[in-house]
Amino acid sequence: MAGPNPVEGVMVSSKITPCTEVFVAKISRKELKSDHFAMEVEHTVDYVAHHKTQIARYAGVGGAVAVAALAAYLYISGQRTARMQALGEAVQVLETPVGAAQSGGPSFPTQDARDKEAVKLFTNLASKHAGSTEGVAARYYLATLTLDQGKTAEAEKMLKEVVDSGGKEYASLAQLSLAELQANAGRAADAEKILRNLADHPTILVSKEQATISLARVLGKSKPDEARKLLEPLAKERSSISRNAVTALGELAPK
């Protein structure tokens, strides 16, 4: 088991777009594909072009202040690039095939070997850059990998730490994973509380529609009428949102 990832039904473009067409029916590591990193990449401009702009801006200022300001800017930009590269490398490990690779590409002999390498890379990134977006992302991935191993109590603790990290986007993903974990553990009331809050406070990575469909699934057994009321408006839309809503409606007990 693993956490949700903005993959299914999302077209990643050159600009950040709300992931409104994602629904996580269950926590599956197959959904932890490169779109997480792609979303992170979209937060960053072309550094070469950006540096040229900064150089032109500071060229007319003169003096040590301009040099120091430009040096600081270049340093921070370089640090971000390095962190993103480290995150991308860790995510690529999760995508590496297990067993014989096609076309002679890289592979791992077992899933356990792949997971160990991924954990090592994510742990290093989370430790070295704890306060950065990439560091928070690494902690989120570590939590989902821990969940993969069946360590639900430890994974829940780690997800709560990501929620409390202050990083709004990955905190919302962690909340969604947490709600799924709690619902699967029979703690529907806890999951409901989280999902209602997510629906009221959507983010780029967890849309209102996504949280609403997840909430409806949690409410399906105890409050089927409310679940149906939440899903029916979404089922009328022409998108993967409607397909997910229709699927969720089909899972409800008939009136």
Image: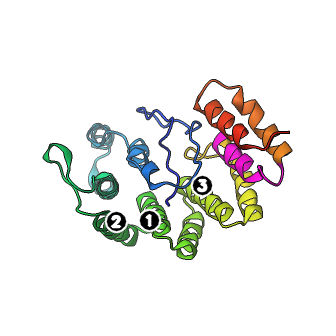
Residue drawn at (40%, 32%), measured in percent from left and top?
A: 14
In this picture, which residue range is highlighted in magenta? Answer: 209-223
Q: Which quadrant is home to the C terminus?
A: top right
Q: Which residue is mark 3?
A: 172
Residue 130 appears in view: yes
Q: Which residue is mark 2?
A: 115
* Location of residue 148 in the rendering, given as x and y in whole percent from the top left corner: 46, 65
Q: Is residue 1 left or right of residue 106?
A: right
Specify which label sits upstream in the sequence, 3 or 2: 2
Q: CA distance from mark 3 to mark 2?
A: 24 Å
Magenta region includes residue 123: no
Q: Quadrant location of residue 238?
A: top right
Which of pointers 1 and 3 indicates the residue nearer the eye? 1
The amino acid type of the residue labelled 3 equals Ser
Looking at the image, which residue is at 75% across and 43% down?
A: 252
- What residue is pinned by disc 1? 145
In the rendering, at what x and y percent does residue 154 appear?
53, 76
Q: Nearer the viewer, mark 3 or mark 2?
A: 2
Q: Is residue 17 above or below residue 193?
A: above
Label 1 sits on what residue type? Answer: Leu
Crowdedness near tag 1: few (<14), some (14–19) or many (≥20) residues, C-alpha within 10 Å: many
Instruction: Between residue 97 and residue 163, name the one nearer to us.
Output: 97
- In the rendered image, the residue lying farthest to the left is 104
Q: Is residue 225 left or right of residue 88?
A: right
Q: Residue at x 48, y 37 (%)?
A: 16
Marks 2/1 in contact by CB < 8 Å: the verdict is: yes
Q: Secondary structure at mark 2?
A: helix
Q: Residues within 10 Å of mark 2 (few under 14, many from 20)?
A: some
Q: Is residue 202 above or below residue 189?
A: above
Q: Residue 87: give x, y in percent of width and height.
A: 34, 57
First of labels 1, 3 by sequence position: 1
